[in-house]
Image (cartoon, helix red, strand yellow):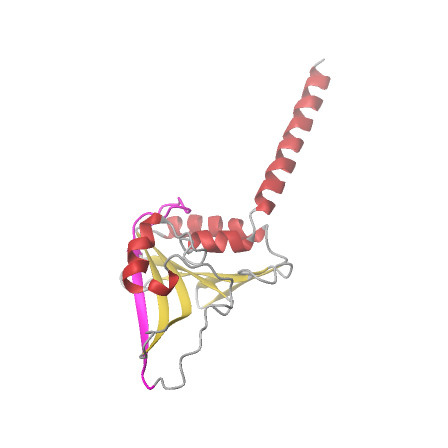
Amino acid sequence: MLAKFMLRKAWCICLLFLVLGKTARAQSMDTFAHQLLFNIFTGNADTAITGFLKLYVPVLYGQKRNAGEWIQYPAADTVHVHDEMHSFIFTKHPHFKEKFSSGRLDVFCKRYENSLLLQNITGVQLWFEFNALEEAEVAFSRLVDMFILGSTDKKFSAVNGAQKAAFTNSRDKTGFNRVQLKLMADNSGPHKFRILFETGNEL
């Protein structure tokens, strides 16, 4: 009886892992990337950031486009172009629950002076900052876990004390299919560390 019970228990555990694995794979790299970026490219941004978008990056407010569709072309009579960077500071993230001291989402834009005040998104960077190496390593491992299942290729490296993880999903031709993470020391003070998240797609 004990042997049958243990066999049945082992089968249930295996089944549970299979279900969890399929659930994790159902969440794509594109989905995780959008979530980390507060869903600002989906047309349904998280409520925590909508006020920031409306005020500083209105081109992202309430609009949905795929990766590669955020470059617009200015009118022929455009004469002035301004490079902009707008930063959203946060201490909590709706889709990432690991401990961090603060976070920052940088949105890089070009604004063209014409009648439409055209604003192009040229890049985004997401930063998490930490007061202890252990906290940074736990968060980095969690982020790696988020992307590793949905990727078809992955590469890990270390340069000058910084850890880097890069992921690619060759099955996805329209969404965020290339991302990278970097864990590094923060020069703002001793025992300070930070993680940088970037997408490899043109916006």
Up-down relation of residue 81 to residue 153 (above or below) = below
Task: Name the spot of residue 36 as percent of width and height, x first.
Answer: 43, 53
State which region is magenta: 79-100
The quadrant the N terminus occupies is top right
Residue 199 shown in magenta: no
Up-down relation of residue 152 to residue 79 (above or below) = above
Task: Name the spot of residue 159 as percent of width and height, x first.
Answer: 47, 68
Look at 44% across and 68% down and name the residue there.
Answer: 160
Question: Of residues 130 and 94, which is closer to you in this image?
Answer: 94
Tell me, yes or no, if residue 141 can be seen here.
Answer: yes
The quadrant holding residue 191 is bottom left
The quadrant holding residue 58 is bottom left
Task: Name the spot of residue 142 as percent of width and height, x first.
Answer: 47, 48
| Residue placed furthest toward the top | 1
Look at 38% across and 61% down and name the residue there.
Answer: 60
Task: Name the spot of residue 90 as percent of width and height, x first.
Answer: 30, 53
The quadrant holding residue 12 is top right
Tell me, yes or no, if residue 144 can be seen here.
Answer: no
Look at 36% across and 62% down and name the residue there.
Answer: 185
Up-down relation of residue 107 to residue 20 (above or below) = below
Question: Of residues 44 and 76, which is closer to you in this image?
Answer: 76
Residue 99 shown in magenta: yes
For residue 13, side relative to residue 131 (left or right): right
For residue 11, side relative to residue 150 (left or right): right
